[in-house]
Amino acid sequence: MNILITGSNGQLGNEIKQLAFNYNNWNFIYKDLPDLDITNKALLENLIKEESIHAIVNCAAYTAVDPAESNQEIAYAVNVLGAKNLAKLSSLYKIKLIHISTDFVFDGKHYLPYKETDQPNPLSVYGSTKLEGEQEVLAECSNSIIIRTAWLYSSFGANFVKTMQKLGAERDQLNVIFDQVGTPTFAGDLAQTILEILKQLEAGSTKKGVYHYSNEGIASWYDFAVEIMSLSNLKCRVYPIETFQYPTPAPRPSFSVLNKEKIKTDFGIEIPHWKSSLKKCIQILNEADK
């Protein structure tokens, strides 16, 4: 099976690369800017035909939440038009498509973990474009799978874990928001789940539609930061603050906990707790520093 990974230089794409050696019978084609722009349909179609693509995992997205507020056209092009191109071509060439989305499609006003059937109501340009991208994918490629995830981090790229480690090493104290709640998600765990889903699709699974995936458990950004400092052996004190004390151009959902029962049931997967996965990621980062 020839599998195209778009946005392959990001956190999730790099984690898939780390696991790909376990799948010797698959041929992975990794593409990112400037080699592949998913908003260029002709270029995308040529690649699909030349490489005889059987499956696509779309990790490409405009994910800069605050800059998206003032770069709406770029966010729309990547998150909506790019997703639509992939879906149309997947349908045309009968390609299995897994598209990655986000908890930002919700407004965070729920009081129970969000199910796939809950009504989206994005607060930001980023969230709105990701939701519209989902809608295009489902409309153009009805057999596709959409995975919404949240609070993604990795040993690759820029993310909250690395930022906290850097600031924790430089400062005696930090203020971190405590009234936004969700679940930190290790991109390595999500990558493993995506590969398991691909294996089941190759074996004939007909599962499709929207799924939620994050690690298990619940935390605030404050809780997350405290655990990072502890596991990183940093002495920096972390103090909780409210969202209004740290204003941002794009509003964030205050509650981003996702219900994962559907993905666990349909694909028979187990999901680690966020603390154990964070420990694993920090161990990887420590090894890389040696």
Image (tube, rainbow, N blue to C red):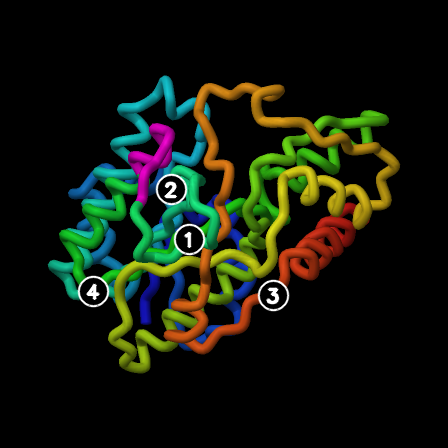
- In depth, the one of 127 and 74 nearer the eye is 127
Q: Which stretch appears magenta?
A: 120-129
- In depth, the one of 180 and 87 nearer the eye is 180
Q: Secondary structure at mark 1?
A: loop
The numbered disc on residue 114 is 1
Q: Amino acid at mark 3?
A: Pro
- Look at the numbered discs 1 and 3 and tell me whether their residues touch, using CB distance below 8 Å: no
State which tag comes first along the sequence, 2 or 4. 2
State which tag comes first along the sequence, 4 or 3. 4
Residue 52 at least partly seen: no
Q: Nearer the viewer, mark 3 or mark 2?
A: 2
Q: Residue at x 54, y 65 (%)?
A: 19
Q: Which residue has dot 2 on it?
A: 106
The numbered disc on residue 145 is none
Q: How many marks?
A: 4
Q: Which residue has dot 3 on it?
A: 272
Q: Which residue has dot 4 on it?
A: 143
